Image: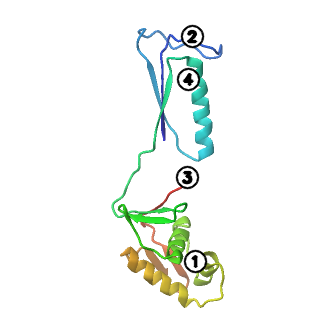
Amino acid sequence: MSALAIAHPRAPHARPDLRPVPDLPEEAPVTVTISIAGGVGGRDRVLAALRELVDAAGPGAAIELEPPAESRVEGEIRLDPRARTALRDGRRLDLSRLEYDLLLFLAQHPRQVFSRTQLLTHVWGHRHTTNRTVDVHVSRLRTKLDDPELITTVYGLGYRLADDAPIAVLER
């Protein structure tokens, strides 16, 4: 997210701890662009402080918020946990509930290998089925994703997401 603040330098200051802008032509506004990364809490604190500064600058100041620019990688899979959707290049992937949950779980735990029993516990919520259930769902998921290398088999251990897997989990 980017925040843009514009203030005219000669506006009277309501706060004595703010210094006036150095001598600039009377009509030249000062433009400050701040890129904010990180969690929602940090972003909210920065925006609150920016609004306070703009209020102190007076009526000639304004804040304009720009949504974050989305960087897209060709073939990238975008998972939205709130909407429970999976998109590849803007097209919706038709995944079952368990296939979606399995892909989301692996995407949220990159570079980690999970045994079939661990996946049954974390994704299915129980261990009452056979380990073969995981193999079948992984196979179906690979077919639907049209990328057999996306979910890697670690022989003798289990499964993991490929290091170069083009998957993004949307966080809001």
Distance, label 1 to label 2, CA atoms, is: 62 Å
Q: Quick check: 77 left or right of 50?
A: left
Q: Which residue is labeled 3 in the image?
A: 172
Q: Amino acid at mark 3?
A: Arg
Q: Amino acid at mark 4?
A: Val
Point out the frontmost of discs 3 and 1.
Answer: 3
Residue located 45% across and 76% down the image: 151
- Residue 141's image quarter? bottom left
Mark 4 → mark 3, Cα distance in angstroms: 26 Å
Which one is earlier in the sequence, the residue at label 4 or at label 1? 4
Quickly name the residue at label 1: 114
Q: Above or below — where is 91 with respect to 138?
A: above
Front of the two marks 4 and 1: 4
What residue did someone put label 2 on? 12
User: Which numbered disc, 3 or 1, marks the residue that appears first in the sequence?
Assistant: 1
Residue at the image position 43 percent from the left and 11 percent from the top: 24
Residue 40 rendering spot, x and y as whole percentages = 59, 46
Label 4, on which residue?
54
